[in-house]
Amino acid sequence: MRNRVVVDGDACPVKPEIARTVRSCGATALLVSSHAHVLVPEDRVQVVTVDAGDQAADLYIANVLQPSDVLVTGDYGLAALGLSRGAAVLTPRGKEIRDTDIAGLLEQRHFSAKLRRGGVRTKGPPAFTDEDRIRFQQKLTALLRGEQENRNR
């Protein structure tokens, strides 16, 4: 059973949804962010502030992540690390990243970065919507309540 949500918190647009969901499911959350972002702890939500270094939040998360955690991140490199630790991985848009997805996502990220280094302008993600928030909260609730594991058995 999943009982803690670990959040790559610097650019996470669903922090209020995470707080509501962990309270309703009896779980906890750990928001990790750099000094550049001030996050406020609240009931069942712990905040850890790390150095502003490029990978400081990712390294902290890598060191505390447990197999029973749900990792919330849009960073595919961190997602790969989370999967290798046995955590469930969820993007802020509510897409669960699985072992079968990660190689293709990392390859796509590498290809896009290569194009940008070559001067090609690539399209960013679409605007974040209320539907994204709803999908995220529904998926996080299902993961915390163990509904996903039961469907996969």
Image (cartoon, helix red, strand yellow):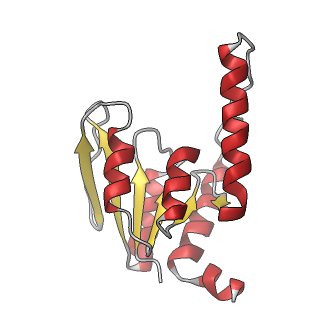
Residue 34 pos. (x, y %): 30, 37
Give the residue at x 33% y 59%. 30
Q: How many marks?
A: 0
Residue 37 pos. (x, y %): 32, 35
Give the residue at x 38% y 55%. 62
Q: Nearer the viewer, residue 106 or 14?
A: 106
Q: Nearer the viewer, residue 71 or 117?
A: 117
Left or right: 78 in relation to 47: right
Give the residue at x 63% y 51%. 93
Residue 119 pos. (x, y %): 71, 10
Q: Nearer the viewer, residue 83 or 97?
A: 83
Residue 105 in view, yes or no: yes
Q: Nearer the viewer, residue 43 or 91?
A: 91
Q: Is residue 3 above or below residue 58?
A: below
Task: Point out the image quarter for the C terminus.
Answer: bottom right
Q: Is residue 145 above or below residue 113?
A: below
Determine the residue located farthest toward the top in the rendered image: 119
Left or right: 102 in relation to 30: right
Residue 19 in view, yes or no: no
Residue 75 pos. (x, y %): 54, 44
Left or right: 118 in relation to 143: right
